[in-house]
Image (cartoon, rainbow, N blue to C red):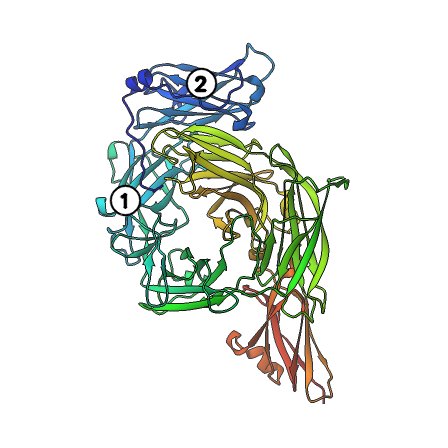
Amino acid sequence: MNVNKYFPTVALSLLWVLLFTPPLLFAQTTPDSSISVFFSDGSFDPPSPSIPPSSGLIRCTSLQGSGAGGTYEQLFSMGESIAIVDVASSLSPYRCKVTYSDPTYTGSTAETGVFDDNPDNPPSLETFFFPRDTQAVINLINQSGTPVTSVSTNVVFLVDKRSPNPFGTTARPDLRTIKPVGPGNSGMGTFDLVGNERYRIEIQPGAGTFPPGEQGSPGSGVPAQGPATRSALRTPNGDYFFLPDSPATLDVPLNPNQSNPPTQKDITVIQADSFIQVTLFDSDGTSAVAAFVNIESTNESNQSLPFPIVVSGQAMSGNSLILPVVGGLSYTVSAGALVTQGQGVQKIQPNPVVVTPSSGQTTEVNLKLTDPNYILNITPSAQTTQGDSVSTSGFSSIACFAYNGRREFSFSQTFSNGIVTLPLLVASLNKAENWRVGCHGIESSMNDSRQFLGEKTYTTAKGQSADVTGVTMTQSGTAYAALSEDIDVDNSNELIFQDGKTTLDIPSNALGSSGTASVTIKTAFGWRSDIDSIPLTTWDISPSMNDTVISDPDDSSELCIPVDEDDLTLYDADINDVVLARYDEEEQRWIEVETTIVGSPGAYFACGSVDHYSIFGTIIDVLEELEESVPTNFKVKLRKKKAKKKKCVFTWDAPDSEVSDALSYVLRFSKVKKKSKCEALEDDDFSTTDVSGTTQAILTTRKACCGEVLVSDSTTSTDRVFKKARK
């Protein structure tokens, strides 16, 4: 499916009421109560009770979850002062959304409380309508400020109800509008909006664009086909552009009848001028394997960019992948073998590398898989929160994983004879090193059941190439079985997940131009943790139409997942460390989504846009938080003081975290002979060594030791230490 669908033309109000009776597609509990819906003109402050300006539709959904059979709809006509929606009282509270047939107006959403036991006292709701009488203009420009007219995009305006209204009005509209901006309108788009509101603006690849990658061997390439990626695209004439992945914000003051010039917003797009060609070789170093490739501009390079550059794609077996970049900047390049869904890791993917391509050039990056040298057999067990043992023999799914501070990982869903086997790569079999190992299990995929999760630090056995360890999984909430909901794609739909809190807002025509789509939702399993991505809550979201799964929708949807703050304390994290992410089962990695945290203590939600359906969840990037921390108690001792060759023994304490045992560090050191010279050294004057899974490093010297240590990828080191041998 493409991203070139737009809202259909809306029929006249009278015909809309007479001819269109939307089918109620949700399984429904028999109503025994009702909600009285009133209408007010939201353009007044305070809003003024009124009659609706056109016919419309009210959809009320139980906050106990869409699957509870609690979605009810009611049409209303222009001029009615009240509309009655019949509902089931046992499924209260409800969220009710009002939409209007006249596209020059937009409605609002309101929530009821829990119904009382008095059937003669049905709840009432005040809803608001707003005229779209204010305009805003979007201009696509390049980094020099020149209009860009050759890039086809879709621009979305969405009322930012996640943040307070800066104009102080209390009534907020439900408004989301999408329009093409590009060659057809000289890179400029005009949008009809509600004034005195704050909007989020998202930019998506438009009609006729393609993904940015090319399959090829050195010196040749075949452009990839299919839809463009969210943040990078190729135009029909072969130019490559990057789009901002983060939404922009725009405050639009009321401007009825365009009495003043419309509010303007410039959106910068970046044109690529160079390429990075990445090949992932098998461990034999000769054959190229099917691989994912991810390229991101470094933090240092981002300082000269309006937004970070992120571009990714997949290379077919026997090919490299050529991806566009902007020359003269530094990029982190990572790659890994694609894995058939359900299979585990067989070989270890390479560590990322940093390259700086020249403008107008293609830089080659050759990476190689590594054979594992250590086999870890995990024996998972399960227990309740009270510590009672639970048999795992009948579990529907058990997956185990391992990861370290070098970002190496292993993963398997094969649970046989009570064992899950993980191949690892140990830096030196003669030395013990720390890994984090864990397992996730679900009792039943057919019915709602318990899920279990456990993780611990494991130290490899020195001098061995195999070992056995147990992982105890503790009950960690409910695993919800698959629930399918049918939705009319011509209308916008809000789905409330089985937990009664997670929501997915699907705009009209996002899943097709007309007809009925089915959205299947269940608790996700078959994922892994790593030091960058520790999952909290996970969902598997799979829409389909006519028995065809929809992975890439025509428009993005809005997903909001609640955050349990108790989960954060275990990792010494806070709400700002939580992000939404998508899990790619082929690539076996979490891909972060631009996230906004909304709500208040005890009721936080992580919200973001979904433009590719698969497994989604809230994750903690523990490493990002730890990169801001500094090791403590950094010391150096000198061994064999009277020998010609002496040993500098650097030791330190890890930052306080559940995963600190698996951290990696960078030790900067020098063999200068005076303390004053040690203190005067610049960062570039040091030699460096990587230290993983331990808090000690030993180096040889003749006279003295000078050093400092920092967490890998951090910019803040410990205080510098110096030690000189006594004569």
Where is residue 512, by image quadrant?
top left
Residue 181 tag number: 1
Q: Nearer the viewer, residue 349 or 497?
A: 349
Q: Residue at x 50, y 38 (%)?
A: 541
**Residue density around tag 2, few if under 14, some if 14–19, many if 20 or more, within 10 Å:** some
Where is residue 166, by image quadrant?
top left
Q: Marks 2 and 1: CB-CB under 8 Å? A: no
Q: CA distance from mark 2 to mark 1?
A: 38 Å
Q: Secondary structure at mark 1?
A: strand
Compared with 30, 238 (above or below) is below
Residue 62 tag number: none
Q: Which residue is mark 2?
A: 37
Name the spot of residue 534 as percent of width and height, x first: 59, 50
Compared with 77, 393 (above or below) is below
Q: Nearer the viewer, residue 289 or 188?
A: 289
Where is residue 436, by image quadrant?
bottom right
> Foreground mark, 2 or 1?
1
Image quadrant containing the N terminus:
top left
Name the spot of residue 219 as percent of width and height, x first: 33, 68
Please indicate whether residue 629 sits to the left or right of residue 94 in the image: right
Is residue 124 visible in the rendered image? The answer is yes
**Residue density around tag 1, few if under 14, some if 14–19, many if 20 or more, within 10 Å:** many
Amino acid at the residue labelled 1: Val
Is residue 355 visible in the rendered image? The answer is no
Please indicate whether residue 135 sits to the left or right of residue 108 in the image: left
Q: Nearer the viewer, residue 349 or 101?
A: 349
Q: Residue at x 72, y 86 (%)?
A: 726
